[in-house]
Every structure is written in structure tokens, then in C-alpha cells.
Image (tube, rainbow, N blue to C red):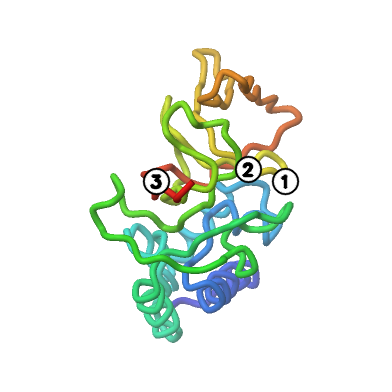
Amino acid sequence: MQKLTPKQQRVYDYIRDTLAATGAPPTRAEIARALGFASANAAQAHLRTLARKGAIELGSRRSRGIRLVGADDDVGERAANDEADAGLPVVGRVAAGEPILAIEHIERRVRIADDVFTSPADYLLTVRGDSMTGIGILDGDLLGVKSADDIRQGQIGVFRIGDEVTVKRFIQSETGDVRLRAENPDYADIQIDPTQDELVLEGLAVGIVRSIH
């Protein structure tokens, strides 16, 4: 592994510490928030540099796409193995401004068969409210979420708007305006003002596990 700059070492240490605490590495958005970067894209740039220097590997479908290598590789391997054995983390209420997979948000872990979701999930989010009942996402359900940095038109995502985390459908106009659409006529669309609203994609919905109502 090539020598890291102090800032690169901070990113590496945050990934290592998050792995040890939660069993999964942080998302790009979580790295940006925790270390004061301007955006998830800035965090991604640091990750690519770490990958070039041989400190991490990117692109793996396991453990949210970041894997430690080098001297501390055993930390990442143990965390990934422990995570797989224990199941997916179930995230409850998210405190304002904190990473969605902060250890205090994880209520338990649940083992889910590989074929339950349309794509491998990184965690389960407990659904709060009835804004998405039109497509069968009900209050109390467990939503399978795959960490992602990009979302396509019409996909269901988990978004952070300021300090609030919400599940909505992503809609973008030809002019680039973004709104988050509920699937319940009782709720209005959330119009995103890029000059005032900080919108962060936490992940893509890949399926649900129905709770017993």
C-alpha cells in the first residue's frame, strides 16, 4: 500500500472504524457527512485514490462495495463474514444528521434468503408512515435497500433531505427539476429546491419483507 496523505488516512480510518462498529462500510454520503466533504462525489474521489494506492478495493457487491486491503485486511474480512452470518442490519428511526447505519440505529439483524429481493440488499429500513401504500409499501414493513450513488427516473429510493430520511419515487423533469413522489394521493410531491434543499441518495429499494399488521 502506498503512503496516504493525512486526509486520505482519515477516510481510511473512518471506513475501518465503521466496519468494526457496524459490520458494514459507510456509504459515500455518510463519508462526506462525517468528514465534512462537500458532497458524496468528493468522497468518491477520495475512495478512488485510496483504491489506486492499494488501500481499499471498490466495486465488490459484498459489504456495500468497499473492502479494506493491506495490513488491516483481516478487519474487513472478519466484519464481512460476521455481517453475512448475522444477517442484514435492520435500521429503525434515524437521528437527525447521523449516518443511516450508525450503530445506535441498528435494532437487530435478520437473515434474508438471496432470492427475496430483486438485487442484493445492504440493509433493511423499517418503514414509517403510509405515503407509499399505493405500491404496497406499508407502515412497519422492512424495506430492502441497496446502497447506491445514482438513481434512474421512476425508481424508488431512500433519500435524506436535510435531517429527514424518506422513501419516495424519484422524478426528474427535462429541465433537471427534481421531485420526490409519494404513492398515496393524500400526500403531495416533495419539490426539491437545489438552492435550499440538501438531497442525498441513501440507497435504492429492492423489495420488502411484509410485517404482520
Looking at the rendering, in which quadrant would you find the N terminus?
bottom left
Front of the two marks 1 and 3:
3
Q: Is residue 52 visible?
A: no
Look at the numbered discs 2 and 1 and tell me whether their residues touch, using CB distance below 8 Å.
Answer: yes
- Are there few (<14), some (14-19), or many (20+) residues within 10 Å of tag 3? many
Question: Could you tell me residue 212's position as x and y percent?
Answer: 45, 50
Question: Could you tell me residue 63's position as x and y percent?
Answer: 39, 65
In the picture, the disc for residue 208 is: 3
Look at the numbered discs 1 and 3 and tell me whether their residues touch, using CB distance below 8 Å.
Answer: no
Tag 1: residue type? Asp
Q: CA distance from mark 1 to mark 3?
A: 24 Å
Pick the residue in front: 65 or 79.
Answer: 79
In the picture, the disc for residue 160 is: 2
Q: CA distance from mark 3 to mark 2?
A: 20 Å
Q: Is residue 188 visible?
A: yes
Q: CA distance from mark 2 to mark 1?
A: 7 Å
Question: Could you tell me residue 125's position as x and y percent?
Answer: 51, 52
Q: Which mark sits nearer the N-terminus, 3 or 2? A: 2
- Determine whether, in the image, residue 97 is placed left or right of residue 167: right
Vertical order, 24 against 140 (above or below): below
Q: Kindly state the secondary structure of the residue where label 1 is placed.
A: loop
Q: Kindly state the secondary structure of the residue where label 2 is placed.
A: strand
Tag 3: residue type? Ile
- Determine whether, in the image, residue 88 is placed left or right of residue 183: left
Q: Which residue is mark 1?
A: 163
Question: Could you tell me residue 116's position as x and y percent?
Answer: 28, 51
- Determine whether, in the image, residue 180 is placed left or right of residue 163: left
- Are there few (<14), some (14-19), or many (20+) residues within 10 Å of tag 2? many
